[in-house]
Image (cartoon, rainbow, N blue to C red):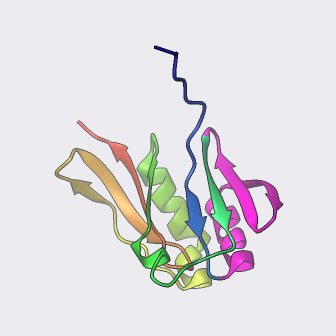
């Protein structure tokens, strides 16, 4: 059997307003490393995704991303202190301990994509 290796997997995150979404993700703390052909490559450390200048009806509201971080309190504080919710008119939930042993919060992007940002807990 051949050795089947994977180098990386990235989601294509939809956006209704490509320029607005690019600014949102940069303000959130991601680096836009490249852009072309209606796709922008974003990363934060080794975590990455592709933002696309496309959004089929209902896609964004049914799209969810999960970002696992070592310090979710720091991320929640950054989101709060940066004023992202007010600046972009998006929803942010309080930090909450989940029954699946994760502390997390939810953040919607300007298109309605839901991000769960969390860390594992005991």
Residue 72 lies left or right of residue 50; in this view the side is: left
13 vs 44, nearest the viewer: 13
In the image, residue 107 lies at what x, y percent?
45, 69
Q: Is residue 39 above or below residue 5?
A: below
Q: Which residues are magenta?
A: 17-46
In the image, residue 11 lies at what x, y percent?
55, 54
Q: Which residue lies at the image location 61% right of the left edge and 63% below the top edge?
A: 28
Question: As drawn, which residue projects farthest toward the front?
Answer: 1
In the image, residue 14 lies at what x, y percent?
58, 70
Residue 49 lies left or right of residue 59; in this view the side is: right
Tell me the quadrant of the picture where the C terminus can be found: top left
Q: Which residue lies at the image location 39% right of the left edge and 66% below the top edge?
A: 106
Number of marks drawn: 0
46 vs 73, nearest the viewer: 46
In the image, is residue 41 part of the stretch drawn in magenta?
Answer: yes
In the image, residue 42 lies at what x, y percent?
69, 54
Query: Residue 104's quadrant in the figure?
Result: bottom left
Query: Residue 119's quadrant in the figure?
Result: top left
Residue 2 lies left or right of residue 62; in this view the side is: right
15 vs 31, nearest the viewer: 15
In the image, is residue 52 part of the stretch drawn in magenta?
Answer: no
Q: Which residue lies at the image location 39% right of the left edge and 51% below the top edge?
A: 118
Question: As drawn, which residue projects farthest toward the left?
Answer: 99
Q: Which residue lies at the image location 56% right of the left edge and 83% below the top edge?
A: 86
């Amino acid at each position: 059997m051949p050795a089947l290796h994977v180098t990386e997997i990235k989601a294509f995150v939809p956006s209704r307003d490509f320029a607005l979404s690019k600014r949102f993700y940069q303000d959130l703390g991601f680096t836009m490393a490249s852009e072309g052909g209606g796709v922008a490559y974003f990363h934060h450390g080794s975590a990455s995704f592709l933002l696309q200048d496309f959004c089929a009806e209902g896609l964004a509201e049914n799209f969810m991303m999960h970002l696992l971080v070592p310090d979710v309190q720091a991320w929640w504080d950054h989101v709060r202190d940066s004023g992202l919710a007010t600046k972009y008119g998006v929803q942010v939930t309080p930090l909450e301990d989940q029954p699946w042993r994760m502390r997390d919060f939810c953040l919607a992007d300007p298109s309605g994509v839901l991000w769960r940002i969390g860390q594992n807990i005991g």
